[in-house]
Image (spheres, rainbow, N blue to C red):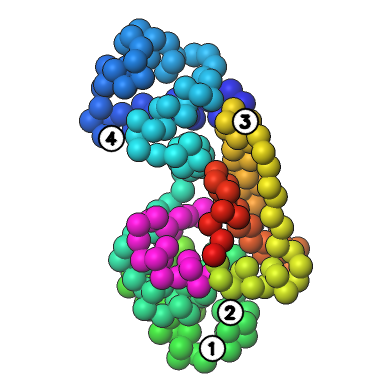
Amino acid sequence: MDKEINNVKTTIKTLLKENKYTQKDLAVYLGISLPSVKRILGPGDLSLNRLSQISLFFNMTFSEFIELSNTKSLTYSMISPKQEKAFINDIINLKVFRSLVLGLNEDQIKKRYALSNSTYQKTLSTLERHELVEVWPSNRVRLQIKWPFQFLKSGAFYKKILPIFLNTAVKNSLQNSKLKALELAISKESILTFQVELNELLNKYKKISSSNMKACPLSELKEVTLIYSILENCVWDELI
């Protein structure tokens, strides 16, 4: 838990610097003294209510702030708009890239997506041109983007590909009876605690996934997709 708190405080300091804010600006927003802010950012605990207020200072939800804190601690690689364009223009580029990240070899990828030699070569050339991979002799490939990576939330992937992906994922989950929803009636403090603990669990398994991908044979790995969203309003009231 101490590591997570340190990550959060490091994220606050980084965001202050990136947005050209001072600790005094944060103190004025929170309605506390500058020494109090210095104590908050120093050693020790940080209350969930105070962290929620700080999230709003940066125009972020509590969940977004925690996710960013975990992201910075995991040192994700960010997919650039130029690289996103390669995936948007032809979805096979994204499929092949994901397969390469998962460790599949050329024969496995071509069989998985029924690709001809020429199509596979063309796809590798596109990925290399967009600085996603480096192609060596005999079609050996070196990834230019380190895993784990993520897409820009304001980018084309989230706007065009993600809705299709979510629609397909929900449809498959309904068919397999694996889609689950949980409704709770809990206090704001409990919601914040739930979000922290959930993000800690997700962070734990992201690290396990990264470790497994490096240590385990591909045949022992199973691709798992987890989709979650915490809706702090009554969805039933919005039904037509």
Residue 91 placement (x, y as % from top left) = 46, 78
Please name the amino acid that badge 3 sits on: Ser
Mark sitting earlier along the chain (3/4): 4
Mark sitting earlier along the chain (1/2): 2
Query: In this orientation, does residue 100 appear?
Result: no
- Left-right relation of 177 to 91: right
Question: What residue does disc 2 label?
Answer: 109
Separation (CA) of disc 1 from disc 2? 8 Å
Separation (CA) of disc 2 from disc 3? 49 Å
Residue 155 on the magenta span: yes
Contact between labelled residues 1 and 3, with CB atoms less than 8 Å apart? no
Contact between labelled residues 2 and 1, with CB atoms less than 8 Å apart? yes
Residue 184 on the magenta span: no
Badge 4 crowding class, 10 Å Cα cut-off, few under 14, some 14 to 19, many 20 or more, is: few
Question: What residue does disc 1 label?
Answer: 115
Residue 26 placement (x, y as % from top left) = 32, 22
The correct choice, above or below, for 30 with respect to 100 in the image is above
- Left-right relation of 124 to 219: left
Marks 3, 1: nearer the viewer: 3
State which quadrant residue 2 falls in: top right
Query: In this orientation, does residue 63 appear?
Result: yes
Which element type, helix, strand or loop, lies under badge 4?
Answer: helix
Question: What residue does disc 4 label?
Answer: 18
Marks 4, 2: nearer the viewer: 4
Mark sitting earlier along the chain (1/4): 4
Q: Which mark is residue 187?
A: 3
Please name the amino acid that badge 4 sits on: Glu
Q: Which residues are magenta?
A: 144-165
Quadrant where the image shows the N terminus: top right
Separation (CA) of disc 1 from disc 4? 45 Å
